Amino acid sequence: MNKQREHSAIALFSGGLDSILAVKWMQQLGYTVHSVFFSTPYLMPDKAIKSAEANDIELIVRDITDEHLKIVQHPKYGYGKNHNPCIDCRALMFQLAGQMLDELGASFIISGEVLGQRPMSQRLQSLMQVSKGSEMKDLIIRPLSQKLLPDSKPILEGWVDKEEMLDLQGRGRTQQMELANRLGIKDYPSPGGGCLLTDVSFTLRLSDLINHWQDNPLQIELLKWGRHFRLSPTLKLIVGRHKDDNLGLDQAAKSLPRMQIKDVPGPLGVLTTLGARQEELSLAASILLSYCNKATEPGMVIYSIDSIESAQIMAHKCSKDSLAQYKISID
Ligand code: SF4
């Protein structure tokens, strides 16, 4: 390890190999690095926490749901393949990390971005847009590719020696894996995954929420579980697909009305608002019954609020065509 450096850094840490490499590279050069993970309902910290623990990295987790929702709704630089506003997202993360510099006594911000690795967010132009959009461009260092990038203040001021930075670029992973070997990093997750904004099914559901002005944190949280059915502009039904969905819905939707099939084990149904009309309750009951083989035809569904039974609804199962008409998700 090199001698302790005077200036320390905040790292945007995703838990992936590149961010581990960026942190470890700077640490072995003697920099103190404060690693931060910014979480939202569609970007959970679990993977980053596990990866940080496995690699002996102290991790700060901050929830940025409110700030992030604004850029998901109105990204300045547009979306990637799905609903992922990657350039705006990265810019926001650098900006928020910049706001933590004083708190952590750090001087600059690092990330594991590699020039040319991702089509949307890591081309040179995109990296520069991220830097500019963050309003922190003078303080950003990307250790894995910094030799190939314009100099920022930490280099111009001599806090960081450009010659000690790396020149990785492109989509291949070989160089990163060799570097991981050199740094003794053995435990890292496979690339990809993690952000639900890149998931087609999640994106469909999120677009539906945005189109109906219902993209608040609770409704976004609920997008992670079950099949979703739009019953009216103000009301959705969510039906658990399996035990994990039912448990997740049960936890997340404590304040919302439930539907369960009477006397038969079956999926949990959650209505996304109170005050559903009778015909909406009948439709929801029909949909719920359609996902229970053991349900009788017609079947009885219990509607409850705060665990107190509020109504029993007799309904027939829906036809496949009707289900398709109301269903938002593709799975
Ligand atoms: S994939 Fe998700 S978390 Fe990653 S930069 Fe894009 S929007 Fe942000």
Image (cartoon, grey):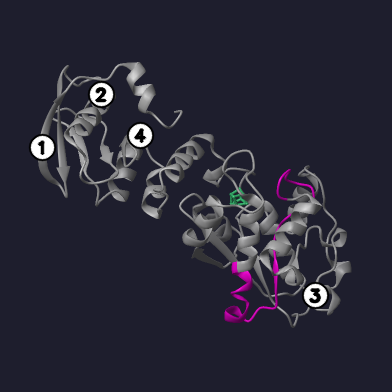
Q: For residue 230, which numbered disc appears in the image? A: 4
Foreground label between 3 and 4: 4
Foreground label between 1 and 3: 1
Secondary structure beneath label 4 = strand
Most frequent secondary structure within the magenta stretch: loop
Q: Position of residue 115 (x, y in %)?
A: 79, 52
Foreground label between 1 and 2: 1
What span is colored magenta in the figure? Answer: 96-121
Q: Position of residue 149 (x, y in %)?
A: 84, 60
Foreground label between 4 and 2: 4
Q: Residues within 10 Å of mark 4 (few under 14, many from 20)?
A: many
Mark 1 vs 4, N-terminal side: 4
Q: For residue 153, which numbered disc appears in the image? A: 3
The Cα–Cα distance between marks 3 and 4, rounded to whole angstroms, is 51 Å
* Residue at image mark 2: 292
Q: Is residue 277 left or right of 111 when viewed as pictured?
A: left
Mark 4–mark 2 CB contact (< 8 Å): no
